Image: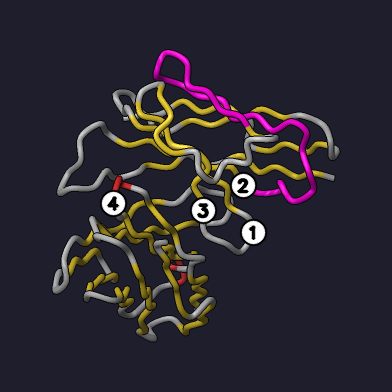
Amino acid sequence: EAGVAQSPRYKIIEKRQSVAFWCNPISGHATLYWYQQILGQGPKLLIQFQNNGVVDDSQLPKDRFSAERLKGVDSTLKIQPAKLEDSAVYLCASSQPWAAGGVRLQYFGPGTRLTVL
Amino acid sequence: EDQVTQSPEALRLQEGESSSLNCSYTVSGLRGLFWYRQDPGKGPEFLFTLYSAGEEKEKERLKATLTKKESFLHITAPKPEDSATYLCAVAGGYQKVTFGIGTKLQVIP
């Protein structure tokens, strides 16, 4: 079974520029998550999709971050304009539509490391 | 708000020196507690899910346990390849998952 795919793996941009990340979840996984992981910290949920609908975006800085999941499969996360504090690894995860034992197990992609100069 | 606190933040062990990592949590309606392993430059890799107090799970040199307030990840006779950051996370109501900052483990030959 193929894992969660993300691209690019690395990105370096100047502050105030825009950037976009792409994620393709595991086939059949209806739920997709975007996390931000700052160096030395745990992943922080930015947005959660169920199919192509948003379930939770309470921690997404909506003035500069946006995300979409067209057709309920792959997803893009965009930052415009980027700030220095956006330097982090952006992780995408997906989970099956049903919950085993009451919880959905999340499978993570390799992440995109963003550096904002 | 759900909270996860992991300790220590970093741990250095000699090969074969057993130890435990701690994860204390507060969550409204625990649905499950997860342990993940994260290697540098990679995404978290699932290790265990625990659902209720008293539950234990094992995988090779790792054993995870759960109480009503905390979880432990016991590492028995670790090897250098066990070096990684170990993340603890809890799933509360509405399947929202909250992660701790992790424990960075280094096992020295």
How far apart marks 4 and 1 lie (CA) works out to 28 Å
Task: Give the chain of mark 3.
Answer: A
Task: Give the chain of mark 4.
Answer: B
**Kind of residue at disc 4:** Gly
Up/down of B81 relative to B94, above or below? below
Residue B95 x %, y %:
30, 46
How far apart marks 4 and 2 lie (CA) works out to 26 Å
Mark 3 burial class by Cα count in 10 Å: few <14, some 14-19, many 20+: many
**Kind of residue at disc 3:** Pro
How far apart marks 1 and 3 lie (CA) works out to 10 Å
Q: Nearer the viewer, mark 4 or mark 1?
A: 4
**Kind of residue at disc 2:** Val
Disc 3: which residue? A43
Point out which mark residue A89 bears.
2
Q: Nearer the viewer, residue A9 or B22?
A: B22
Mark 4 burial class by Cα count in 10 Å: few <14, some 14-19, many 20+: some
Tag 3–tag 4 contact (CB < 8 Å): no
Disc 1: which residue? A39
Residue A43 x %, y %:
51, 53
Element type where label 1 sits in the image = loop
Task: Point out the stretch of residues depicted in magenta.
Answer: A66-89
Task: Give the chain of mark 1.
Answer: A
Instruction: Choose top left, top right, bottom left or bottom right for residue A78.
Output: top right
Instruction: Choose top left, top right, bottom left or bottom right for residue A51.
Output: top left
Element type where label 3 sits in the image = loop
